Image: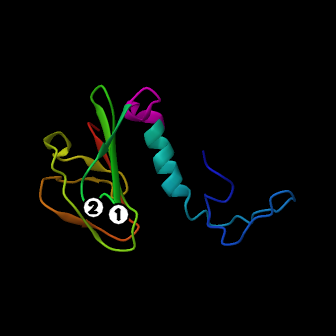
Amino acid sequence: LIYSGQEEPVLRSLKFFDKDPITFGKYQRAKFYSTLLDLRKRNPALAADASFRKVSVGDDQAVYAYVREKDDHKVLVILNLSDKNQTITVKEAGLQGKPYNLFMYTNEPLTDKPWQVEPWGYVVYEYGR
């Protein structure tokens, strides 16, 4: 579900009961949402009946990571929910390999070696693409 104003930053509060038009122009976030919606439409791992599993990849107080899977399709999402760099280590052999980084548009080697996610950063990996 995408709410009004998410496709372009609206940096003010919107009136709730009164008509309060949103001025659109550059659609700064359109590509972000289009990429996610395209992934959801074409990848069975994001279907309603796909499995969900939380994964520990770092400081569980600051990093939330999960895997969605169905058949041979898999999506790994890593979210840094803090204002500090976070060290990520993917220990599960089944998540290691060379998945596709959805927002960097490339396959990346994912091993058990630690790496960093920037403050408030995120990574979405698609397997079997």
Q: Which residue is mark 2?
A: 59
Q: Residue furthest right?
A: 18
Please state which of residues 4 and 92 is positioned toward the viewer in this rendering: 92
| Residue 123 in view in this figure | no
Task: Identify the amino acid type marked 2.
Answer: Asp
Tell me where residue 62 appears, x and y as whole percent.
Answer: 35, 63
| Residue 84 quadrant | bottom left
Residue drawn at 87 percent across, 59 percent down? 18
- Magenta region: which residues? 41-50
- Give how far apart the Cα atoms at labels 1 and 2 are: 5 Å
Task: Identify the amino acid type marked 1.
Answer: Ala
Q: Is residue 42 magenta?
A: yes
Left or right, 116 with respect to 30, comes to: left
Q: Is residue 25 above or below residue 71?
A: below
Tell me where residue 88 appears, x and y as whole percent.
Answer: 23, 60
Q: Which residue is mark 1?
A: 62
Render colour scheme: rainbow
| Residue 23 quadrant | bottom right
Circle 1: element type = loop
Left or right, 113 with respect to 99, comes to: left
Left or right, 60 with respect to 111, comes to: right
Q: How many marks?
A: 2
Tell me where residue 117 appears, x and y as whole percent.
Answer: 30, 66
| Mark 1 vs 2: CB contact within 8 A | yes
Identify the disc placed on residue 10: none
Q: Is residue 61 magenta?
A: no
Tell me where residue 91 appears, x and y as whole percent.
Answer: 15, 49
Circle 2: element type = loop
Badge 1: residue crowd in 10 Å (few <14, some 14–19, many ≥20): some
The quadrant of the picture occupied by the N terminus is top right
